[in-house]
Image: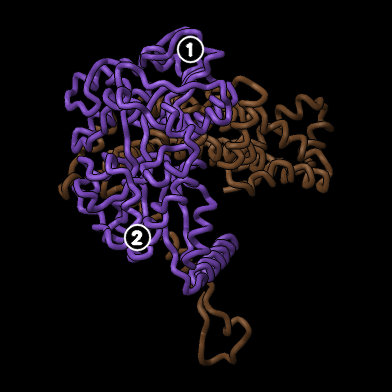
Amino acid sequence: MKTLKKIACLALALALSLSLFACGGGSKVTLNVLNWGDYIDPDLLRQFEDETGISVKYTTMTSNEEMLVKLASADNIYDVCFPSDYLIEKLVAEDLLYAINKANIPNLSNIDSRFLDLAFDPGNQYSVPYMWGTVGILYNPTMVSDPVDSWNILWDEKYSGEILMYDSMRDTIGITLKKLGYDINTRSEDDILAAQEALIAQKPLVRAYLTDDIKMELINGSASMGVVYSGDAVYCISENPDLAYAVPKEGSNVWFDNIIIPKTSTRTAEAEQFINFLCDAEVAAQNSDYIGFSTPNAAGLALMDPSYAADPTYNPPQDVLDRCQIFQDLGDFVKVFSNAWTKVKAA
Amino acid sequence: MKQTKTTKPKTATGMLIRRSVFAYPYVVWMAIFILAPMLLILYYAFTSDGAVTLENIVRASSWDNLRVLADSVRFALYTTLLCLLLGFPVAYLLSQMKKTTAALLSVFFIVPMWMNFLLRTYAWKVLLSAFTNMLYTESAVLLGMVYNFLPFMILPIYTTLIKLDKSYIEAAADLGANPRKTFLKVVLPLSMPGVISGVTMVFIPSTTTFAISQLLGGGKTMLYGDLIYMKVITEQSWDTGSALSIILLAFVLVSMTFMKKAERKTSDEGGGRLW
């Protein structure tokens, strides 16, 4: 009885403190922003808050899949989000996105037309380009003697325990499909099975399956090579000039992360204001310079140091892009991918 | 107890609200945060498109998934054993000290518990990569689990040991038992309720661990909790995730029943019970 009473008091205290929290907050408009980790210059968030009086509540996650769970849930609270191409395709198909009023985003004219009107969102009805890039191998030439021009090097026993793979289903199965010469958006169960077996065979050589942590490991030399997004490679090379980036000859994934507003948002005007802010040439330049990812903002790129445009990691030449594929939404076939991925992770 | 309202003049106790009223917020709390989620898991696990089915459970008990469960149990057993081997001596030493010294020393393992375990696990990640080459191995995962669950082994054993009636030990000594024999024949058996509480409190959360394996194992060691996480988050297959949870829950309930039985057997003889 005594303990029961204690617990009751505790519960009461908790309930009271919770109701206190609920009373907080003022009249200030808050935008809930959901983004990838290390994917914006935090100074820009403060600048936006100062300029507009809108406060930004910023949350991060590590995969498109996680983003989908949050956006598709009935009580989604987010007003602005930064998913990739194939997820946008799915979100559009599921009617989860707000059709953007382009009149509110005059800075859209800064965007290079190469990045507009892509297959996943024809006419950019729902999304505005944010960053883009490729997937490739970031390696440390002081530790890797062989030329890095093929995905096969990630399967080379010589580098056992030094290889980092990306802890993301689409990316990792995607590059394995490319290594095996298959389509990155394959709908063949045999192709996926082959990729699954290749990844299981590779597992003993892999140091770890990571996401944002890959950067630190490569910068401080704990591993000799890893699968990264091109923008992360730009950042890592700026921290450790020993590192080099390569998009293997078998081809890879070229991706586009766009900004969207979920249909459930009640702050669409403020969200559009935020998107317009991010499309400002100076803001885009500062942001891209800070995070290292490639900006689709032509006016912004023009303001940046010319070394960026000349850097094949930041600004991949056409022959690299020609061998890269954009991810498509897999529909129900995603189950086959996830089954394979679970088997790899549990092996 | 029943209070007669009208005949007696109002006494201090009459003014009080019935005690059970204080439990209502707790009942509401439990209903919302424990019962409702459980019912949802049951619903997802046993239905498919609104029809009752065992399909999810069958799919979730595939050979691959059971192997992950076996792996988790193996990790949980190692963790429990290591925690016991480390925790018992610590609890015993603490119980032999002056109360104030023991209180001061226990601060060292209680205060870190005030911090979120994720932060502490991140700290281990930095330590392991800076000073050892253990990071991203199974040993690192085991270390993280032992570190996180050790206090749950020490505390119940310690509470049992300090409540232990000293006259038993004196009696044993009077009757000619040497300290070693006294420990083995008197202290150890009498501390069993604490040991079993500790084992339960370490084994159960160990079996359901995730995150630690993800952080310190570098995504190479998949425990059952990670599997559920993957099914729900990456695959958004809530039904399979729920079915996996039900299987885990059944396993935990069965092992708890065994431990409760063992506890009841040993706790007839005095000793403190933490829960």
Provide residue B172's location: percent of width, then percent of height: 79, 32
Q: Does A33 sit above or below residue B105? A: below
Mark 2–mark 1 Cα distance, whole angstroms, equals 48 Å
Residue at figure coordinates x 31%, y 31% from the top left: A254
Provide residue A182's location: percent of width, then percent of height: 22, 19
Provide residue A325's location: percent of width, then percent of height: 26, 28
Are the residues flagged by discs 2 and 1 from a single subunit?
Answer: yes
Residue at figure coordinates x 51%, y 85% from the top left: B4
Looking at the rendered structure, the secondary structure element under dot 2 is: helix
Does label 2 or label 1 sit earlier along the sequence? Answer: 1
- Residue A125 visible: yes
The answer for which chain carries disc 1 is A
Q: Is residue A333 or residue A313 the one in the foreground?
A: A313
Q: Is residue A183 or residue A15 the one in the foreground?
A: A183
Residue at figure coordinates x 50%, y 78% from the top left: B2
Q: Is residue A5 or residue B180 the one in the foreground?
A: A5
Left or right: residue A213 versus residue B127 is left
Quarter holding the N terminus of chain A?
A: bottom right
Q: Amino acid at mark 1?
A: Ser
Q: Amino acid at mark 2?
A: Glu
Name the quadrant containing residue A194: top left
Q: Is residue B202 or residue A140 the one in the foreground?
A: A140
Q: Residues within 10 Å of mark 2 (few under 14, many from 20)?
A: many
**Chain ID, brown in image:** B
Residue at figure coordinates x 41%, y 12% from the top left: A153
Q: Does B42 sit above or below residue B203? A: below
The residue carrying mark 2 is: A272
The residue carrying mark 1 is: A160
The answer for which chain carries disc 2 is A
Name the quadrant containing residue A268: bottom left
